[in-house]
């Protein structure tokens, strides 16, 4: 309850006390009677209270824990008269106990009691404390009197402020303790805010949003963002209830009576002198504190935390989740790869301290080796094949000599494939593989029966800006550049159209063939001229022969 909710009225204290005890404080209502009848059927006990008067007492008041009556007919019994023929033995016991308490009361000693509010009257409340009934005036109760607010049954703590031995009454005050605590709180807060030196507090309660810490008898909240220089943390991972911690006061909200504390401000900020603590390239021991799908947060000590990205956990590029490699509270050695002082961020690497798979691969393999690997992933440009501990790229161009085939049409993840190593780039960590290199090139076979100058006929397969591809026999393609098309024109050609030309270039190693129509025309002209000259030579030789014969 807040102090502003408490209603305080100026009421005559003596009048309230008189109102509360005007019936119960009289000595005459406590009498010693005699049991004259025990009626179990009607659940009552008839008691002679003197003056020829009988009164009824509830049977339950004289039964023990086992249900047996503790009095018999003829036994004397102390009772309190309640009026209208009703009496109470328990009230008499309470009155006797209260009188005993009052008799032993030491005015020099302070008494703090705790009890339950059992009754309410115009003047205040009756609070039962260990079977004794004490009176708490409303103005000393600090209990709300707003409509709908019921204080009956509420547990309260109060101080004894008055004992009237003549009237047999005890007055208690909750207000006394609350105002005393408030004064103590103001004193503690003032000292904490004026002196910014750290003080020792005890953790009383840990929640998801922070911790309540007792400092000198007052509780303050350490928000989870004020626990560590690392940033917001889960307090239950680092502390337990009962732990002692150094704290400083940040602020105090008087209206809400809320004290804010900080643990991190009570300890040196490691980022203020980070350059002398850690640097790029350092190898440090860290403890895994939190695992996420994208990486791992590790505790470096010194109130520092670093991030280990999933790509820095292993040289294996197919790490699905960090939890497959690491677990919480595990100690690992990592290398510092980034110190961002302005952003207060540290990045570390685990794989940098592990043997590089490429080094092991290069020591055992070389270009030209034929190996067996497993397809791990397929992309638009090819497939990645795991060979040992590394992954090599099998490009679409290296799948088959048939250019219509690619990784997606020929392979699937998990397939085992035999490939040839065609390139190793150790510095870049890349390996190029080829499947078609294990097969004879169609161009190579074609080159065994054709050579530069051979006349061939093909059909138009594709028309590009730089030339025309034609399909020749034996499933090989050739390129006719635009400058070699004359007298044909590219924009007048159609796919499937036959073109005749002469081979101008053939290289089985690069799988390339070039054809020229223009050279074919020149070659045909040259061959025609040669044939004509040959024919002329043959005619002149025959004439000469006949001439010689005629001369003879």
Image: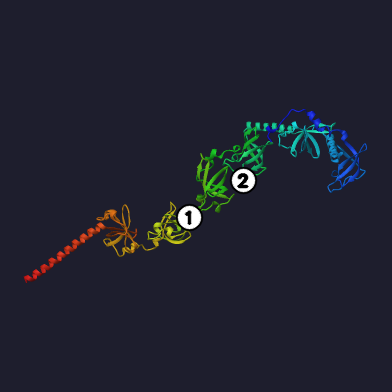
Q: Are marks 1 and 2 in contact (CB under 8 Å)?
A: no
Q: Position of residue 386 (x, y in %)?
A: 47, 58
The residue shown at (63%, 45%) is 236
Q: Could you tell whether 76 is left or right of 18 in the image?
A: right
Q: Could you tell whether 451 is left or right of 433 in the image?
A: left
Looking at the image, the residue that sits furthest to the left is 551
Residue tagged 2: 237
Q: Could you tell whether 83 is left or right of 368 in the image?
A: right
Q: How many other residues sit within 10 Å of disc 2, few (<14), some (14-19) or many (≥20)?
A: few
Q: Determine if residue 110 is in view.
A: no
Q: Relative to 3, does residue 65 appear above or below in the rendering?
A: below
Looking at the image, which is closer to me, 271 or 66? 66
Q: Relative to 352, does residue 544 appear above or below in the rendering?
A: below
Q: What's the coloring here?
A: rainbow
Q: Relative to 1, does residue 474 appear above or below in the rendering?
A: below
Camera-side mark, 1 or 2: 2
Q: Position of residue 82 (x, y in %)?
A: 85, 37
Quadrant of res 253: top right
Q: Which element is circle 2 on? A: helix
Q: Which element is circle 1 on? A: helix
Q: Determine if residue 417 is in view.
A: yes
- Which quarter of the image is occupied by the N terminus? top right
Q: Position of residue 240 (x, y in %)?
A: 65, 44
- Which quarter of the image is occupied by the C terminus? bottom left
Looking at the image, which is closer to me, 484 or 289? 484
The residue shown at (22%, 60%) is 524
Give the spatial CA distance, label 1 vs label 2. Answer: 36 Å
Looking at the image, which is closer to me, 305 or 25? 25
Quadrant of res 527: bottom left
> Mark on residue 228?
none
N-terminal of the pair, mark 1 or mark 2, is 2
Residue tagged 1: 357
């Amino acid at each position: 309850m807040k102090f502003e909710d408490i209603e305080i009225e100026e009421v005559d204290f003596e009048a309230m006390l008189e109102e509360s005890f005007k019936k119960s404080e009289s000595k005459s209502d406590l009498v010693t009677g005699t049991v004259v009848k025990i009626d179990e059927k009607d659940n009552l006990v008839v008691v002679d209270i003197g003056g020829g008067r009988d009164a009824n007492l509830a049977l339950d008041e004289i039964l023990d824990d086992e249900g047996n009556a503790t009095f018999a007919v003829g036994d004397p019994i102390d009772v309190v008269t309640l009026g209208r023929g009703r009496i109470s033995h328990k009230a008499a016991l309470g009155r006797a106990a209260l009188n005993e308490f009052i008799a032993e009361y030491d005015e020099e000693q302070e008494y703090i009691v705790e009890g339950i509010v059992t009754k309410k009257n115009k003047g205040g409340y009756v609070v039962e404390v260990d079977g004794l009934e004490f009176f708490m005036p409303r103005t000393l109760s600090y209990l709300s009197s707003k409509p709908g607010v019921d204080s009956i049954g509420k547990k309260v703590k109060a101080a004894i402020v008055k004992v009237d031995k003549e009237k047999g009454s005890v007055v208690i005050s909750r207000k006394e303790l609350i105002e005393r605590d408030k004064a103590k709180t103001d004193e503690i807060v003032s000292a904490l805010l004026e002196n910014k030196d750290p003080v020792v507090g005890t953790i009383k309660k840990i929640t998801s949003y922070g911790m309540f810490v007792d400092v000198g008898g007052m509780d303050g909240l350490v928000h989870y963002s004020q626990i560590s220089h690392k940033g917001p943390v889960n307090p239950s991972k680092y502390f337990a209830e009962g732990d002692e911690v150094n704290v400083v006061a940040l602020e105090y909200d008087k209206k809400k009576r809320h004290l804010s504390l900080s643990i991190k401000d009570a300890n040196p900020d490691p980022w203020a002198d980070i350059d002398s603590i850690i640097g790029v390239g350092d190898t440090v021991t860290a403890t895994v504190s939190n695992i996420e799908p994208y990486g791992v947060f590790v505790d470096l000590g010194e109130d520092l935390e670093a991030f280990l990205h999933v790509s820095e956990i292993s040289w294996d590029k197919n790490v699905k989740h960090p939890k497959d490699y690491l677990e919480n509270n595990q100690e690992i050695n990592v290398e510092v790869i980034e110190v961002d002082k302005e952003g207060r961020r540290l990045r570390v690497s685990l794989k940098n301290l592990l043997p590089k798979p490429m080094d092991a691969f290069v020591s055992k393999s070389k270009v030209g080796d034929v190996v067996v690997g497993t397809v791990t992933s397929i992309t638009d440009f090819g497939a990645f094949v795991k060979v040992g501990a590394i992954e090599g790229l099998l490009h679409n161009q290296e799948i088959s000599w048939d250019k219509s085939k690619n990784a997606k049409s020929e392979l699937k993840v998990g397939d085992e494939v035999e490939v040839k190593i065609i390139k190793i780039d150790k510095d870049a960590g890349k390996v190029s593989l080829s499947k078609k290199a294990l097969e004879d090139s169609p161009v190579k076979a074609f080159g065994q029966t054709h050579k530069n100058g051979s006349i061939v006929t093909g059909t138009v397969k594709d028309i590009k800006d730089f030339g025309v591809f034609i399909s020749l026999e034996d499933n090989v393609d050739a390129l006719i550049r635009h400058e070699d098309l004359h007298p044909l024109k590219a924009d007048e050609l159609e796919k499937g159209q036959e073109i005749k030309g002469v081979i101008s270039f053939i290289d089985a190693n690069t799988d390339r063939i070039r054809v020229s129509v223009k050279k074919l025309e020149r070659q045909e002209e040259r061959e025609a001229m040669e044939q004509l000259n040959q024919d002329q030579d043959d005619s002149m030789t025959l004439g000469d022969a006949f001439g010689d014969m005629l001369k003879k």
